[in-house]
Image (cartoon, grey):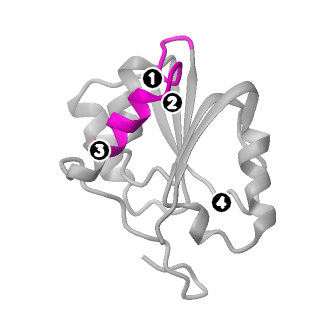
């Protein structure tokens, strides 16, 4: 998928891709990252494959995605798995302030798509004090 300037925005992993399991195993190893008392934001959530697999272990989850291209997959998975504590917002983090602050933040393969370093300030603004951030980038 490309934005209006021809910049590649990436493609989300399918729900059954091995990379989902690998990354979630790493997230589970972070002490205190998972918990029913924590709110979670997934920046660049795509179809929700990571966040929705964690939803039953979190207080609530919000996914932010720049395009609605994968929203139907997100909603279908939520309905099939009876997930009611999560939502996806179509949202551009480079043009807006966070819609809320959260305790935990995921961001897989997103930072390399940001057009300016200033866009990283969104991550800081989205996190509560004593929060945890788990991110990765594709090189």
Dot 3: what SS? helix
Rendered location of residue 76, percent (x, y): 26, 42
Mark 2 vs mark 3, CA separation in Å: 20 Å
Tell me the mark number nearer the camera, choosing from 1 and 3: 3
Asked if the residue under mark 1 is in contact with the one under mark 2, i.e. CB atoms within 8 Å, the reply is yes
The answer to whether mark 1 and mark 3 are in CB contact below 8 A is no
At mark 4, the secondary structure is loop
**What separation in Å lies between label 2 and label 1 (alpha carbons)?**
6 Å
Identify the mark at residue 22; answer none if there is no mark: 3
Instruction: Determine which residue is flagged by label 4.
Output: 92
Left of 34 or right of it: where is 125?
right
Q: Is residue 22 above or below residue 27?
A: below
The quadrant the N terminus occupies is bottom left
Determine the residue positioned at 46% across, 30% down: 86
What residue range appears in magenta?
22-37
Of pointers 2 and 3, the one earlier in the residue sequence: 3
Residue at (38, 45) in percent of width and height? 48
Relative to residue 120, is residue 138 depicted above or below? below
What is the C-alpha distance between the residues marked 1 and 4? Answer: 22 Å
Query: Which badge, 4 or 3, is on the more N-terminal residue?
Result: 3
Mark 1, residue position: 85
Using a 10 Å C-alpha cutoff, classify the residue at mark 2 as few (fewer than 14 neighbours), some (14 to 19) or many (20 or more): many
- Image quarter of residue 78: top left
Within 10 angstroms of label 3, few (less than 14), some, or many (20 or more) residues? few
Nearest the eye: 25 or 13:
25
Disc nearest the viewer among 4 and 3: 3
Which numbered mark, 2 or 3, is in the foreground of this view? 3
Residue underneath mark 2: 61
User: Residue 107 at what x, y percent from top left?
Assistant: 54, 49
In this rendering, does residue 43 appear at all?
no
Taking the spot 49% from the left edge, 15% from the top edge, the residue there is 35
């Amino acid at each position: 998928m490309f934005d209006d300037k021809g910049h590649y925005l990436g493609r989300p992993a399918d729900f059954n891709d091995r990379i989902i399991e690998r990354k979630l195993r790493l997230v589970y190893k972070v002490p205190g990252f998972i918990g029913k008392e924590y709110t979670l934001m997934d920046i660049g959530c795509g179809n929700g494959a990571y966040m929705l697999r964690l939803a039953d272990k979190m207080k609530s989850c919000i996914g932010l995605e720049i395009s609605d291209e994968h929203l139907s997959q997100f909603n279908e998975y939520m309905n099939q798995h009876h997930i009611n504590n999560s939502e996806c917002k179509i949202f551009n983090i480079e043009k807006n302030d966070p819609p809320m602050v959260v305790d935990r933040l995921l961001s897989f393969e997103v930072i390399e798509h940001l057009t300016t370093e200033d866009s990283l300030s969104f991550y800081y603004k989205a996190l509560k004090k004593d929060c945890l951030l788990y991110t990765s980038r594709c090189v």
